[in-house]
Amino acid sequence: MIKILTLSTAFLLLYSTLNAQIKSQSAVKSALPKGIAFKGKVNQAIQFQDNTGSYLTFSTQTGEQPQKGDDQFKQAHLYGYLYQNKGNGQHTPIWQLHDFIADCDLDIKAQIIPGSLTVTDLDKNGKAEVWIAYRLSCSGDISPSELKVVMQEQKLKFVKYGIGKIKIGKALQPDGGEVISDQFKKAPVSFKQYADKLWNKYLVETN
């Protein structure tokens, strides 16, 4: 059983106890507890408890930045973090997700999809799965972004990666929609089904 907990008055979180899936709300962009190291700006945070302990997971992104050593190019980074709460204000890092676009002199994007950070226990083993989805692109025209759906259960990690689709107005463009790599094919069925659900949910990007 997994329990979601309130982090502080600075964060808006949903309190709930569920056997399979935890529903969460986006966190207010504010400071995290002292001693937690991260890069970028926080866009969502969830604190939860499973059979292995109490945890804080959150996502951040830097937005567009000049590239060090060459102002002609831009870079953009995004991150996901999981920290375990050891008590007395102590938090131990468990894992960090980092992805980015660099060497880009066109329109750049490294964007976590709003609300995509979720916590589940689909295999009902008492260990939480953390999910996050995001888009990456460096493009000078209107073209679909790379799309990734990532799940981590402690050190276990699966990724589904490919090219999304883009909708301009009411017109869905023909390009994109390809899955390039899907590690969930080797994952438990419940993980694969949920990854497919998220992929379809986030496949189309509106321009």
Image: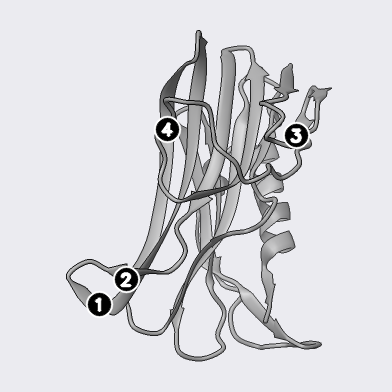
Q: Are marks 2 and 1 in contact (CB under 8 Å)?
A: yes
Task: Inspect the image, locate mark 1, and give the three-letter code of the amino acid beneath it.
Answer: Asp
Nearer the viewer's eye, disc 4 or disc 3? Answer: 3
Separation (CA) of disc 1 from disc 3: 39 Å
Quadrant containing the N terminus in the rendered view? top right
**In the structure shown, which secondary structural element does the residue marked by tag 4 occupy?**
strand
Q: Which residue is under mark 4?
A: 95
Judging by the rendered image, the residue that carries numbered circle 3 is 13
Determine which of the numbered discs, if any, sits on residue 66 in the image. Answer: 2
Q: How many marks?
A: 4
- In the figure, 36 relative to 50: above or below? below
Left/right placement of residue 198 relative to residue 91 reads right
Q: Residue 165's x, y, as percent? A: 64, 77
Q: What's under tag 2, amino acid-wise?
A: Pro
Q: Residues within 10 Å of mark 2 (few under 14, many from 20)?
A: some
Identified at 48% across, 37% down, the residue is 81
Q: Position of residue 173 (x, y in %)?
A: 68, 88
Decide which of 154, 54 is in the foreground and name it: 54
Residue 71's label in the rendered image is 1
Q: For the residues marked 4 and 1, what is the alpha-carbon distance in whole angstroms?
A: 31 Å
Check disc 2 and report its element: helix, strand or loop: strand
Marks 2 and 1, how far apart at CA = 6 Å
Q: Amino acid at mark 4?
A: Trp
Crowding at dot 3, Cα within 10 Å, few <14 / some 14-19 / many 20+, comes out as many
Residue neighbourhood size for the residue with mark 1, other residues' Cα within 10 Å, grouped as few (<14), some (14–19), many (≥20): few
Circle 1 — which element? strand
Labels 4 and 1: the sequence-earlier one: 1
Q: Position of residue 129 (x, y in %)?
A: 61, 32
